[in-house]
């Protein structure tokens, strides 16, 4: 199982390949906003992917459009509800609002 690490706390969680980073964070008890419940409509689950970007799912149109309208987006930004874990470990920082 891939490991999901959250910075700056350094907490780690076991994730399931094919499931969202948001679900792994919530299962681990992380305080991350998810106002639209994972529909790529609110942008509140904004994260920065620090390591392992290549192993997670590619950005689809709905996520891309939502990120375009989200404040503080950078080249490592993803929506945790839309980014699906792959087989490799991933490190993220939660930027949600
Ligand atoms: S929970 Fe709303 S965009 Fe991810």
Image (tube, rainbow, N blue to C red):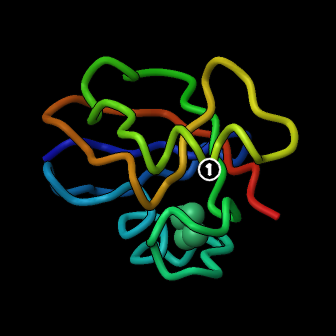
In-front residue for pair 28/37: 37
Residue 50, quarter of picture: top right
Location of ligand 1 given as a quarter of the image: bottom right
Residue at 39 percent of width and 45 percent of height:
4
- The residue labelled by disc 1 is 66
Residue at 25 percent of width and 25 percent of height:
55
Q: Crowding near pointer 1: few (<14 within 10 Å), some, many (20+)?
A: some
- 64 is higher (above) or lower (below) than 29: above
- 9 is higher (above) or lower (below) than 53: below
In-front residue for pair 32/61: 61
What number of labels is visible? 1
- 45 is higher (above) or lower (below) than 47: below
Tell me: is circle 1 under 8 Å from ligand 1.
Answer: yes
For mark 1, give the secondary structure: helix
Q: Position of residue 73 (x, y in %)?
A: 76, 33
Q: Position of residue 20 (x, y in %)?
A: 32, 58
Residue 3, quarter of picture: top left
Q: Position of residue 16 (x, y in %)?
A: 17, 57
In-front residue for pair 55/74: 74
Q: Position of residue 56 (x, y in %)?
A: 29, 33
Q: Is residue 16 left or right of residue 68?
A: left
Residue at 21 percent of width and 42 percent of height:
2
């Amino acid at each position: 199982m891939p490991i999901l690490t959250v910075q700056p706390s350094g907490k780690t969680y076991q994730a399931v390949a094919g499931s969202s980073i948001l679900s792994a964070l919530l299962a681990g008890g992380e305080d991350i906003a998810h106002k639209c419940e994972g529909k790529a409509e609110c942008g509140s689950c904004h994260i920065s992917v620090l390591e392992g970007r290549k192993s997670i799912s590619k950005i689809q149109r709905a996520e891309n459009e939502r990120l375009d309208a989200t404040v503080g987006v950078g080249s490592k930004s993803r929506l945790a509800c839309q980014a699906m874990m792959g087989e490799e470990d991933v490190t993220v920082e939660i930027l949600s609002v």
